[in-house]
Image (tube, rainbow, N blue to C red):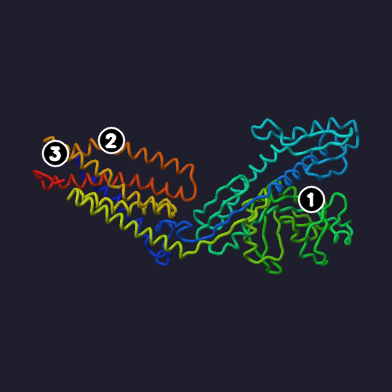
Amino acid sequence: MLDFPRWKVSLIWAALILGMLCAVPSFLPERLLAPLPGFLKPRVNLGLDLSGGSHLLLEADPAEVAKLKLTTMEEQIRTELRRGDPKIAIGDISATGGQLSFMVRDPQQVDAAVERIRPMTQGAGMTGQRDFDVTVKDGNTITVAPTQAGLDAAVKSAMEVATEIIRKRIDEMGTREPTIQQQGSTRILVQVPGVQDPTALKALLGQTAKLEFKLVDATANPAEVAQGRAPIGSEVLPYPENPSGIPFIAVKRQVMVSGDELSDASQGYDQQSSAPVVNIKFNGSGGRKFGRVTQENVNKPFAIILDGKVLSAPNINEPILGGSAQISGNFSVDSANQLAISLRSGKLPVKLNVVDERTVGPQLGADSIRAGIIASIVAVAAVIIFMFVSYGRFGMYANFAVVINVLVIVGVMGILNATLTLPGIAGFVLTIGTAVDANVLVYERIREERRRGRGVVQSVEFGYKEASRTIFEANVTHAIAGGIMLALGSGPVKGFAIVLLIGIATSVFTAVVFTRMLAARWLRHARPTDIVI
């Protein structure tokens, strides 16, 4: 147990020195590290409560989810009845009263229409219900109404998707370690460290980014459009930049191509006007669909619609077959880049409104850091004094291990690009306080072996050997608790768990392996006949 060959000593020192060197960048100002490549400057990121940042609470409207679900079902019904064999002719679909209703022109095809529509409904979770009820009224009128179980399942799915899309959008901003978690059934909490102005963040996260291409209804009467009325099969949408001066335009309800079929989006500049634009590329099916639609509608205007608002309505001068297009509008470089990020990350399945907004100033974070540093220094000083008074030389070995352990924890957190939060500092101080637990167990066992009459070397050897099992079992239980917090927790709980787990691993290594090496080298060179411990 006390045999440390040269290669093992070198390996232990190399691991500790590497960990301490990785801790250095976290204590240096950013300007000194700027010229270095990223892999040479591992740093510990500071959480929202330490560096300041923005706190947003977003909420979805379940009624909006129900409306979108009904719109999707309407499109599916139109497509299935029109393209099926045989085709089933129906009248206009009404979406009033939170349900769909339409008339089958041939009463003999009512049963066939119902048989085609029912497979489009799905099970609503584990409730045993369907998400839509399909019924027949007055012989030839079919009604499709969403069930409550279906709406609940739709809201749950929409919030899960929205959470992931928000995560993608924030990651595109280059922000490290944001906190994004769902609260309740309709709310999402977002905390982004380092962002002091939440205006751009709100614009990015609040944008649904639902992109659609629809044909303009050229038959619509401008006077009726101005009053919000459109022909059957069309709808009136706001068009703030309409050259005609009327801030509305009538477009066909059928979607030509949607943003779901995009493969990429990026901010660029118009080749003629040099104005900021968004360049988009369609995937294979989207490119083919866009090419076919533009071929069939040459010399007709089409509308580019974002979140229910028309950005522009250019004329199709020629077929667009390259699978790419350009979105123009009254963009700035920042707004065009935000739109590109939103389109790349995908559209939100439901609009999110900001219901709570807070900004954590950097001064509050500085106060927290100062308090955490003071607490850490006091904890280290108290541990050092206690160990020296209680165990003398061996206590100093433990103190040396504690100091190295502190630096190694910071180094490992830097390598893992981990985030330090205020609860993380609490975990840090707790780790310092418990880092000498293993040494206390070892040293008390050495005292016991000496009282039994064993020699110095045998007492030290048996002390480390017999205490190792207890140390291992105690730290495994701590690691299990920390692992559960890391897996199930989020935000501050997760930050605490990360520091705790890293501290468990490093403290066991420094308190057992490192101090045993120091004790072994002293015994080999000094060969004492007695020890004071």
**C-beta proximity under 8 Å, tags 1 and 3:** no
In the shown orientation, is residue 279 left or right of residue 450?
right
Image position, residue 420 (x, y; %): 43, 54
Check the image and name the residue furthest to the bottom. 273
- Mark sitting earlier along the chain (2/1): 1
Image position, residue 434 (x, y; %): 31, 47
* Residue in the foreground of this view, choosing between 25 and 194: 194
Residue type of the residue flagged with mark 2: Arg
Q: Secondary structure at mark 1?
A: helix
Q: Looking at the image, is mark 1 or mark 3 nearer the viewer? A: 3
* Residue in the foreground of this view, choosing between 69 and 168: 69
Task: Tell me the residue that label 3 is attached to.
Answer: 450
Distance from the alpha carbon under mark 2 to that under mark 1: 73 Å
* Residue in the foreground of this view, choosing between 4 and 431: 431
Residue type of the residue flagged with mark 1: Val
Q: Secondary structure at mark 2?
A: helix
Residue type of the residue flagged with mark 3: Arg
Quadrant in which the C terminus is drawn: top left
Task: Tell me the residue that label 1 is attached to.
Answer: 293
Q: Looking at the image, is mark 2 or mark 1 nearer the viewer? A: 2
Distance from the alpha carbon under mark 1 to that under mark 3: 91 Å
Task: Tell me the residue that label 2 is attached to.
Answer: 469
Distance from the alpha carbon under mark 2 to that under mark 3: 20 Å
